[in-house]
Image: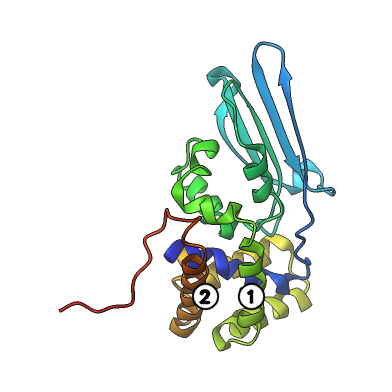
């Protein structure tokens, strides 16, 4: 639930002046000489390289390289894989266009050297809900609820003031990260509860096709 809280808290990013886009990215997969496989999934518009945050695992020498390119707001705009092992292009395409907090706060984990293989990271059990075709319904629902929630509005007001003051993307992104905290730990308790309850409801409704999550039954035991 903690990871889900961090993911859902990314909905607060809509106040930064960068409209969230859920248009499907373009994905290409092909075979390269030497037995290598290439997959790239990208949004239509990508800023210059010097405006991107590049997060990579592996290397050409290892025969496996994966790169995530994020914009200043932490949104994944581009994913590139080159390696000998097959990957899941459809699943990888689901990651592109999303704010990194939805992806188990992957930016923070990468900075702390806790991710050494993006492909394996995104195959972990926590990620299965992201590939569900109804996940965006949860995202839209959370956005609507957070817009009227006291804790959510508090963070939104902070970001709006920064935007009005002309702060750059990096500053606004840092403000949001500090206001939300890892796994949403700095959010108001009522806000965290709202996010957790909504996420658990989503998992319960889709339990038959998302059996990887341990869902509390709500019962107390003495």
Q: Residue at x 59, y 27 (%)?
A: 86
State the quadrant of the C terminus.
bottom left
Image coordinates for residue 111, horizontal then vertical, percent: 51, 47
Q: Residue at x 59, y 20 (%)?
A: 84
Residue 75, quarter of picture: bottom right
Image coordinates for residue 193, horizontal then vertical, percent: 45, 79
Relative to 86, say whether 192 is above or below.
below
Whether tag 1 and tag 2 are in contact, CB under 8 A, the answer is yes
Image coordinates for residue 2, horizontal then vertical, percent: 43, 65
194 horizontally vs 39: left or right: left
| Disc 1 crowd, CA 10 A, few/some/many (<14, 14-19, 20+) | some
The residue sitting at the front extreme is 208
Regarding residue 7, the answer to whether it shows in the image is yes
The residue sitting at the top extreme is 34
Which sits in the foreground, 34 or 77?
34
Comes first in the chain, label 1 or label 2: 1
Residue 64, quarter of picture: top right
Relative to 140, say whether 97 is above or below.
above
Q: Which secondary structure, mark 2?
A: helix
Q: Residue at x 44, y 71 (%)?
A: 185
Per the model, the C-alpha gap separating discs 1 and 2 is 8 Å
| Disc 2 crowd, CA 10 A, few/some/many (<14, 14-19, 20+) | some
Q: Which residue is mark 2?
A: 198
State the quadrant of the N terminus.
bottom left
Residue 63 badge? none
Q: Which secondary structure, mark 1?
A: helix
Which sits in the foreground, 54 or 83?
83
Q: Which residue is mark 1?
A: 141
Q: Residue at x 47, y 41 (%)?
A: 115
């Amino acid at each position: 639930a903690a990871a889900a809280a961090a993911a859902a808290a990314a909905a607060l990013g809509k106040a930064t002046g960068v409209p969230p886009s859920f248009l499907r990215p373009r994905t290409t997969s092909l075979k390269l000489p030497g037995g290598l496989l290439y997959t790239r999934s990208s949004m239509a518009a990508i800023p210059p390289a010097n405006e991107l945050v590049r997060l990579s695992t592996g290397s050409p020498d290892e025969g496996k390289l994966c790169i995530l390119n994020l914009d200043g707001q932490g949104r994944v705009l581009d994913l590139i894989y080159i390696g000998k092992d097959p990957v899941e292009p459809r699943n990888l395409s689901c990651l592109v266009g999303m704010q990194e907090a939805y992806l188990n706060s992957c930016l923070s984990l990468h900075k702390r050297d806790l991710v050494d293989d993006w492909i394996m990271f995104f195959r972990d059990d926590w990620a299965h809900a992201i590939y569900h075709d109804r996940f965006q319904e949860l995202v839209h629902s959370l956005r609507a609820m957070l817009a009227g929630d006291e804790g959510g509005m508090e963070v939104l007001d902070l970001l709006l003031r920064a935007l009005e003051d002309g702060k750059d993307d990096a500053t606004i992104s840092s403000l949001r990260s500090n206001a939300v905290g890892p796994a949403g730990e700095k959010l108001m308790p009522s806000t965290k509860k709202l996010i957790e309850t909504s996420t658990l409801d989503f998992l319960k409704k889709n339990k038959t096709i998302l059996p990887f999550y341990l869902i509390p039954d709500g019962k107390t035991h003495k």
